[in-house]
Image (cartoon, helix red, strand yellow):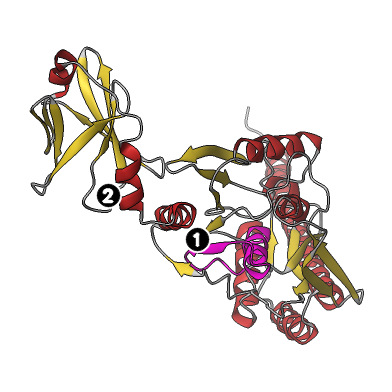
Amino acid sequence: MKPSSSSSSSKVHNKLKQVYLFHMLVVLVFLFFLSCHTTTDHKVNKEEQDVISSITNILEKNYVDKEIATELSRMLKENKSSGKYEGLDNTIFVARVNRDIRSIVNDRHLQVMTNSPSKKLPWSKSSILKVDVLEGNIGYLKLSVFPNPNKEYYGQMANALGLLKDTNGIIIDLSDNGGGHPDAVSNLLGYFVENKTLYDSFYVPSIDKSFEYTTRGEVKGHKLMNMPLGIIVNERTASVAELCALAFQNLQLGKVYGTTTMGLVNLAEYYPINDSLYLLASKGKQKNPFNVNIEDKGVIPDIRSDNAIVQAHLDLIKKAHGSSFKDWYNKSLGKTPVKLNDSLINTYVGNYGYLTIGKKDSTLYYNDEMGFSYQMIPLNENTFGLKLNSDERFRLIFKENRGEVMLIKKYFDGSEISYERL
């Protein structure tokens, strides 16, 4: 039986109605997605606007230079109005704002950061990296950072300097020291100054107040008054480590050796912008009794040297012993003679890379790559000094490694080179 025309028409109508409703549903879903996307964009843009407003407010209230703060605020507000920061993710947004800031002022403290301050501060219990006594009874103290000092730190510093109190001079190595807390600097300086002494100060314009840094009057352990000092710095010495080197220089406590420091000393503070961003900004400028400001200039060494530790070592030996290193060293070698038997001496003879150890009349000789020969003076069974006619500064140490004799050339700054016997 054939269907009636009215029944067929009704079915077509119902089909069209279903298609229409499906299309309408698709359109509604699309519009809903579009409205959500548009709302999200608006929210992000608003957040970016709020970030710029927060940055400019912080700068105008706290930045160390009011004129530059005004110029930075104007530039950032103009960029915000022009839509320069719209639609950027956090990483690109921060990079672009920092680039724009740098176009106005080269303040390396001033930057927007995504890290919290606690992740940026390099506090460490192992801030005293090395304590040693070098040739000629010269002390060596290597500091990686100046931590926020506590009882444990004061004890560690007292112990370190206690080991060096009977030396003829001390090298304090601040190379690669990124700074830290001024109280640790004040404590270190306190060992070499009799009374509490002003060594630096900073002025904070936003609160119209100065902060003074003084050496610590009382220290744990022994004071080391009149101790000859050599301070080592380089281009990575920064912040309060620079203030420390400058204080040794200004207070005439010791000479500074090395290369010009970073020049990053303004007082700075982390200001929260929102839950994920911070503004690190300079809030105070150096204003000390010596009328010296090293921001963006750095500490200029008294003695420029790319081999600063060796140079300071030589100078301190000369000051202590009143003669050149070579004369002092050659004289000192004969003070405690050590006699070795021939069988032991013979185990050291041979070729070590391009170096040769030879023997003549029960005496060992060191022959270098240039063909020069030096008499080896035994200091103990496996360590030798050289009878110098040059300024080379190392000892030769023989060690056994898996049944083979190895020669170690150990320099007086603590570095060493090893050679296997061929």
For image coordinates 32% across by 44% down, the residue present is: 331
Locate the C terminus by quadrant: top left
| Occupied quadrant, residue 178 | bottom right
In this rendered view, identify the residue nearer to me: 85 or 329: 329
| Occupied quadrant, residue 408 | top left
Locate the N terminus by quadrant: top right
For image coordinates 44% across by 58% down, the residue present is: 315
| Occupied quadrant, residue 261 | bottom right
Q: Magenta span has 254?
A: yes
Where does the image place residue 372, in percent across and percent down from the top left? 11, 47
Left or right for 362, reference 315: left
Marks 1 and 2: which is nearer the front? Answer: 2
Q: Is residue 315 above or below residue 131?
A: below
| Mark 1 closeness class: few <14, some 14–19, many ≥20 residues within 10 Å | many
Q: Mark 1 and 2 residues: CB-CB less than 8 Å, in contact?
A: no
For image coordinates 23% across by 42% down, the residue present is: 387
Where does the image place residue 311, in percent across and percent down from the top left? 41, 58
Where does the image place residue 323, in percent across and percent down from the top left? 38, 56
Q: Magenta span has 245?
A: yes
In this rendered view, identify the residue nearer to me: 356 or 122: 356
* Residue at which label 2 appears: 392
Q: Which mark is residue 234?
A: 1
Q: Is residue 372 above or below residue 346?
A: below
In this rendered view, identify the residue nearer to me: 360 or 335: 335
Kind of element beneath mark 2: loop
Report whether residue 98 is seen: yes
Q: Amino acid at mark 2?
A: Glu
Q: Sequence order check: which comes first, mark 1 or mark 2?
A: 1
The segment highlighted magenta reads 239-263
Q: Amino acid at mark 1?
A: Asn
Left or right for 242, reference 394: right
Kind of element beneath mark 1: loop
